[in-house]
Image (tube, rainbow, N blue to C red):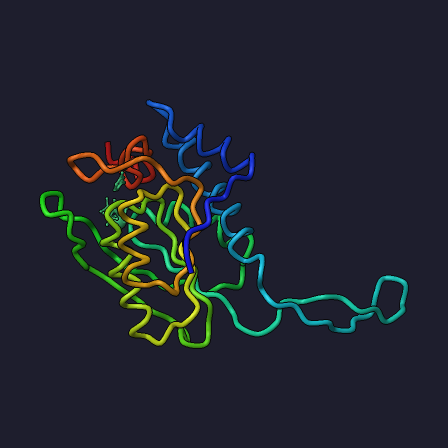
């Protein structure tokens, strides 16, 4: 379905703060969650509503809107995806959470799977896959393959920063998926890092170094 770069001023401002050299773990974590919330707001803007009747404060019955139908599963890609999870759940507190554990082999850049735990009926739910970085796209493609194997049909990807190479690779394999990002950056460097990017998002969120 394609790529949506969220140009909202708050998103752009917060992402800009995240790019600064030497940013503290505290600030990086806070901003990851805040941008995660704002991307969630955009990625859910077409959710269906239905009208229901409730007792209002004055004692009169009134009509209000509520979310209809399919429920949400949030799928953080470990580790770094955890850094956006609280921000997503702030807006969708009843979501189920399924996790996928992947890391990139630093030489081959191929994703290595080490854990997964899927909960609920994924085929009946909308999946929001979260990871700060979409670089070569290998980790995301592996995750989308797993979700599709579980029968998931409506999948939306939320990333803070995407590289053109990764977007192209994901959409070539999974053209039905919608990617929401705060930035489509310039390129990958020779080590597979996004330029200008954020550096190693997992290390910054977990305080690895
Ligand atoms: O698009 P790709 O080329 O696959 O790269 C992106 C992946 O790399 C990072 O994870 P990393 O492997 O550093 O693991 P971590 O989250 O445990 O730090 C990032 O969080 C993505 O999962
Ligand atoms: O730029 C990148 C690429 C992969 N993983 C990261 O954390 N950053
Ligand atoms: Mg990872």
Residue at image location 89% in from the left, 68% down from the top: 59
Name the quadrant containing residue 99: bottom left
Q: Position of residue 69 (x, y in %)?
A: 57, 74
Please state the total of marks drawn on the protein image.
Answer: 0
Apparent side of residue 142 relative to residue 83 in the rendered image (left or right): left
Apparent side of residue 7 relative to residue 144 in the rendered image (left or right): right
In the picture, which quadrant includes the C terminus?
Answer: top left
Residue at image location 15% in from the left, 35% down from the top: 190
Name the quadrant containing residue 56: bottom right
Q: Position of residue 39 (x, y in %)?
A: 49, 48
Apparent side of residue 73 relative to residue 139 in the rendered image (left or right): right
When the figure is inspected, residue 58 is found, relative to residue 78, above or below; the finding is: below
When the figure is inspected, residue 76 is found, relative to residue 204, above or below; the finding is: below
Q: Position of residue 125 (x, y in %)?
A: 46, 71
User: Which residue is nearer to you in this view: 14 or 168?
Assistant: 168
Residue at image location 44% in from the left, 28% down from the top: 17
**Residue farthest along the left direction in this orientation:** 107
User: Which residue is nearer to you in this view: 155 or 186?
Assistant: 186
When the figure is inspected, residue 63 is found, relative to residue 110, above or below; the finding is: below
In the picture, which quadrant includes the N terminus?
Answer: bottom left
Residue at image location 46% in from the left, 36% down from the top: 31
Q: Position of residue 174 (x, y in %)?
A: 32, 63
């Amino acid at each position: 379905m394609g790529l949506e770069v969220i140009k909202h001023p708050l998103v752009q401002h917060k992402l800009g703060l995240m790019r600064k050299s030497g940013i503290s773990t505290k600030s990086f974590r806070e901003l990851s969650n805040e941008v995660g919330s704002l991307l969630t707001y955009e990625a859910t803007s077409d959710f269906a509503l239905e009208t229901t009747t409730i007792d209002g404060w004055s004692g009169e019955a009134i009509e209000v809107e509520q979310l209809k139908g399919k429920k949400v599963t949030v799928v953080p890609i470990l580790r770094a995806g955890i850094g956006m999870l609280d921000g997503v759940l702030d807006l969708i507190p009843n979501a189920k959470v399924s996790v996928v554990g992947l890391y990139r082999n630093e030489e081959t850049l191929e994703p290595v799977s080490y854990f997964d735990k899927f909960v609920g009926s994924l085929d009946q739910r909308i999946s929001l896959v979260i990871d700060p970085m979409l670089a070569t796209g290998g980790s995301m493609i592996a995750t989308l393959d797993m979700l599709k194997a579980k029968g998931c049909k409506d999948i939306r990807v939320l990333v803070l920063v995407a590289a053109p190479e990764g977007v192209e690779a994901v959409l070539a394999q999974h053209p039905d998926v919608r990617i929401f990002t705060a930035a489509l950056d310039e390129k990958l460097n020779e080590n597979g890092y996004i330029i200008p990017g954020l550096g190693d998002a997992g290390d910054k969120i977990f305080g690895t170094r």
